[in-house]
Image (cartoon, helix red, strand yellow):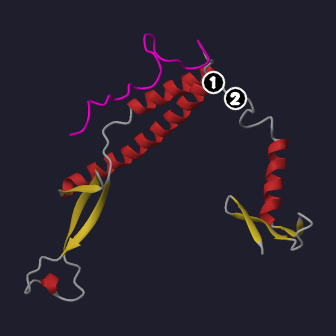
């Protein structure tokens, strides 16, 4: 049996375990070229440690400044919409029409803006020729909005981890509420 280990899409090594149950080890290890590339990259990072990203975590104030910068960037996104634009050709179904001939693409192109409508349904609308570029630009801004939103969530999670804990260490029930079991139902009497 041969085990193959992958790291970032590169072959790192092929390991063939020993068949004897008394020894837990490997019989043969092949170090692929990707392993040496990773090792060279690690040495380059060590040699260039003075340059590039710092090895310390950003402070809480730096993270909050980053979040504010992302909020500002988000406010400049502009109008956007989700979905996609597709080019569609269709046949009308009339037997004497040119679209009925074999190999004919059909009538079109019709540009259709579609998006998910919730509950597994898709909603769509045919676009006029002059509105296609406007809708494509709005779709691109939606991708920008989604990326900035992802970054905001990531920074907020880091802020939550960096912010010190205040107050009691364990959550408790709200004041005035008692814990305990819910009341039992009472039997009303003999069944008739």
Residue extending farthest right: 23
Residue 133 shown left or right of residue 10 in the figure: left
Examine the residues drawn in magenta and state their main secondary structure: loop
Left or right: 7 in relation to 142: right
Q: Quadrant of the N terminus?
A: bottom right
Give the label on residue 57, or none: 2
Of 161 and 73, nearer the camera is 161
x and y, in percent, of residue 164 in the image: 63, 18
Distance between the Cα atoms at labels 2 and 1?
A: 9 Å
Q: Inspect the magenta stretch and tell me whether residue 173 lies in it.
A: yes
Q: Does the CB distance between marks 2 and 1 fall below 8 Å?
A: yes
Q: Is residue 31 magenta?
A: no
Above or below, comparing residue 123 to residue 100 in the picture: above
Residue at the (38%, 28%) spot, across then down: 184
Q: Secondary structure at mark 1?
A: helix
The segment highlighted magenta reads 167-192
Which residue matches tag 1? Answer: 162
Neighbour class for label 1 at 10 Å: few (<14), some, many (≥20)?
some
Percent x, y of residue 131: 21, 52
Residue at image position (40%, 26%) is 182
Question: Which residue is at 32% across, 28% downward?
Answer: 186
Tell me the tag on residue 82.
Answer: none
């Amino acid at each position: 049996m041969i085990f193959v280990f992958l790291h970032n899409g590169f072959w790192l090594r092929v390991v063939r375990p020993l068949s004897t149950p008394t020894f837990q080890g490997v019989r043969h290890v092949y170090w692929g070229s990707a392993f040496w590339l990773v090792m060279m990259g690690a040495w380059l990072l060590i040699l260039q440690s003075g340059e590039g990203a710092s090895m310390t975590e950003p402070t809480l104030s730096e993270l909050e400044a980053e979040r504010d910068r992302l909020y500002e960037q988000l406010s400049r996104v502009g109008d956007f919409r989700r979905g996609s634009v597709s080019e569609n050709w269709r046949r009308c179904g009339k037997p004497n029409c040119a679209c009925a001939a074999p190999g004919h693409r059909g009538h079109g192109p019709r540009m259709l803006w579609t998006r998910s409508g919730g509950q597994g349904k898709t909603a769509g609308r045919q676009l006029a020729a002059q509105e296609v570029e406007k809708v494509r630009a709005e779709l691109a801004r939606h991708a920008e909005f989604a990326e900035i939103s992802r970054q905001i969530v990531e920074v907020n999670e880091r802020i939550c981890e960096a912010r010190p804990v205040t107050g009691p260490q364990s959550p408790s029930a709200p004041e005035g509420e008692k814990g305990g079991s819910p009341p039992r139902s009472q039997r009303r009497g003999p069944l008739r």
